[in-house]
Amino acid sequence: MLKRMLDIIISLFTLTLALPLLLIVSVAIYLSSPGPIFFKQKRIGLGGSEFNMFKFRSMVANAEKKGPYFTSENDPRITKVGAFLRRTSLDEIPQILNVLKGDMSIVGPRPNVMSQKELYTEEFWNYRNSVRPGITGLAQATRRSDATAEERDALDREYIEKSTVIFDLKIIMQTAAQIIKKGGN
């Protein structure tokens, strides 16, 4: 209950502070490429339930029809504005709405798409979905996007085992440091 209260407080505070930035990003996306400003995708949440996760669109419209599911540094589907949004993690800000709705938490394992279920054992799939997925997690705080799948899984397991409000606050601070460190590259 304390974690949920913290999620709501941080989300409302962040949303209030970020409102001017959200407007600027929205205009930049609108002016830079045709298509919607937001991207929504079915993801898996607490208990294996599906929800629509929101992000700022960082790829060309209908990108999934223009190539296979992959994300690489040189993905031609990523727009110029999108590359900046991804580098700075600004594309993730709309997930605050998912936190307010209760689909996500500020901190937790990143939510998977259903097709990723085959990558896990049934036991680990259920274990990682025993908590709300997060906007950030231990893997993002410590390795950003440099972690291998095995390292992310180990870090997700570690997070679930050690999960406390204090640990969440530490992860939030580490994530901010990672964004500042890598965002300028």
Image (cartoon, grey):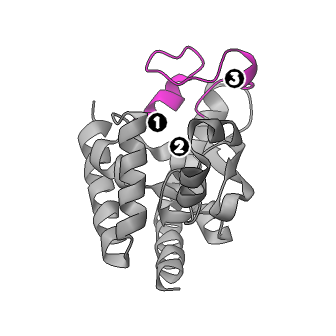
Query: Image quarter for residue 163?
Result: bottom left
**How far is the residue under mark 3 from the one under mark 1?**
15 Å
Label 2 SS = helix
Residue 73 drawn at (x, y percent): 43, 20
Regarding residue 94, the answer to whether it shows in the image is no
Circles 3 and 2: CB atoms closer than 8 Å? no
* Secondary structure under the numbered disc 3 in the rendered image: helix
Instruction: Nearest to the eye among marks 3 and 2: give it.
Output: 3
111 vs 119: above or below = below
Residue at 50% across, 55% down = 135
Residue 98: quarter of image: bottom right
Residue lying at 74% horizontally and 37% vertically, measured from the top left: 36
Q: Earlier in the sequence, mark 3 or mark 1?
A: 3
Q: Give the residues in magenta.
A: 58-87
Kindly identify which residue carries mark 3.
63
Nearest to the observer: residue 111 or residue 74? 111
Q: Is residue 82 magenta?
A: yes
Mark 3, residues whose alpha carbon is within 10 Å: few (<14), some, or many (≥20)?
some
Quarter of the rendering containing residue 97:
bottom right
The residue under label 2 is: 91
Give the farthest residue toward the bottom.
Answer: 1
Asked if one can make out residue 72 in the rendered structure from this viewpoint, the answer is yes
* Along the viewing direction, whichever of 42 and 160 lies nearer the viewer: 160
Q: Is residue 185 above or below residue 180?
A: above
What residue is shown at x 28% (from left), y 66% (from top)?
A: 170
Q: Which residue is mark 1?
A: 86
Amino acid at circle 2: Asp
| Foreground of the two, 38 or 63 | 63
Q: Which mark is residue 69?
A: none
Please say if the residues under marks 2 and 1 sit with CB atoms less than 8 Å apart: yes
Q: Report the magenta stretch's main SS.
A: loop
The amino acid on which the numbered mark 3 sits, given as a three-letter code, is Ala
